[in-house]
Image: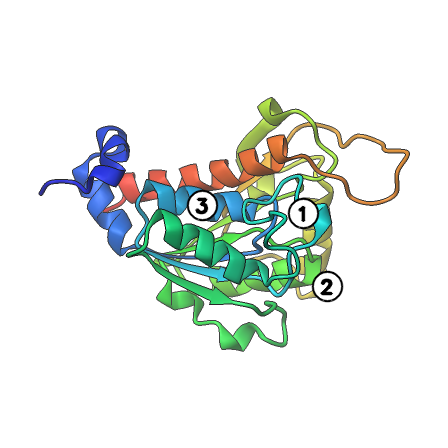
Amino acid sequence: MACDSRFSRSEIVLGSDAIERLKTAKVIVFGIGGVGSWCAEALVRTGLGHLTLVDSDTVAASNLNRQAMATSKTLGEAKVEAMRRRLLEIAPDADIAARAERFTPETAGNFDLASFDFVVDAIDSVADKAELILRTLACGGKTRLFSSMGAALRTDPTKIQVSQFRKIEGDGLARALRGRFRKLGGKIKGDFLCVCSSETPCVSEVAGRGSLMTVTAAFGLTLVSLVLDAVRRHP
């Protein structure tokens, strides 16, 4: 089958079978920020056919330094709506759903995670992130989970790596998640791949969790590489 010319360069690398599977794959991305927005864009640019975006936040001026949909024209808009519009300009025929809501332990029942092939976790909140991880792992092997650990206060994208969650060391978000899991009853069911950094977070004189696009976007693109690898290797 001839490949859509928009994705012909992707087909050269991934193969026609993987491109066809990518067209039918269903991915949901939680957190459309410095990591999740670039993850979403790269998925659609590579040929993903079905994408759901989840984030309750609106575009702020402080997002301009690192988020794909943040421009002077989108300030104040719901992030998911601005992102959806941007993605449809790239692939008008893509099935893209925008859910301007927050995934929490209280709202988790509103999301049918088992209906997706891939869940991408780019959530910052420890409680919400832990709930998403636990619920996705409970779906079983059909739904694959890929999670982003801490990208804030890092400057070196060459220190980014992929690791199983249980093997991550020196990451504050992973450490906080382990504490949360202990409070919720101990060990998690199974393991999952994460994007993390071996870089020690910098110490800033300015209050807040600063972050750079050079790192957050690289986190997001690495998450996409995990999805693509799974699509290519596991028909």
Q: Nearer the viewer, mark 2 or mark 1?
A: 1
Instruction: Count neighbours of disc 1 (C-alpha within 10 A) and say few if under 14, some if 14 to 19, many if 20 or more.
Output: some
* Nearer to us in this view, 208 or 225: 208
Q: Quadrant of residue 123?
A: bottom right
From the top left corner, tell me how far across and down residue 8 is, in percent. 22, 34
From the top left corner, tell me how far across and down residue 230 is, in percent. 34, 43
Instruction: State how far apart marks 3 and 2 are (Cα).
Output: 36 Å
Where disc 3 sits, the SS reads helix
* Nearer to us in this view, 127 or 168: 127
From the top left corner, tell me how far across and down residue 183 is, in percent. 73, 63
Residue 63: mark in rendering:
1
Looking at the image, residue 203 sits to the left or right of residue 97; the answer is right
Q: Which residue is mark 3?
A: 41
Of callouts 3 and 2, the N-terminal one: 3
Q: Nearer the viewer, mark 3 or mark 2?
A: 3
Q: Which residue is mark 2?
A: 183
Where disc 2 sits, the SS reads helix
Residue 182: mark in rendering:
none
Of callouts 3 and 1, the N-terminal one: 3
* Nearer to us in this view, 209 or 161: 209
Q: Residue at coordinates 60% horizontally, 48% vertically from top-left?
A: 70
Q: Amino acid at mark 2?
A: Lys
Q: Quadrant of residue 125?
A: bottom right
Of callouts 2 and 1, the N-terminal one: 1
Q: Amino acid at mark 3?
A: Glu
Q: Amino acid at mark 1?
A: Asn
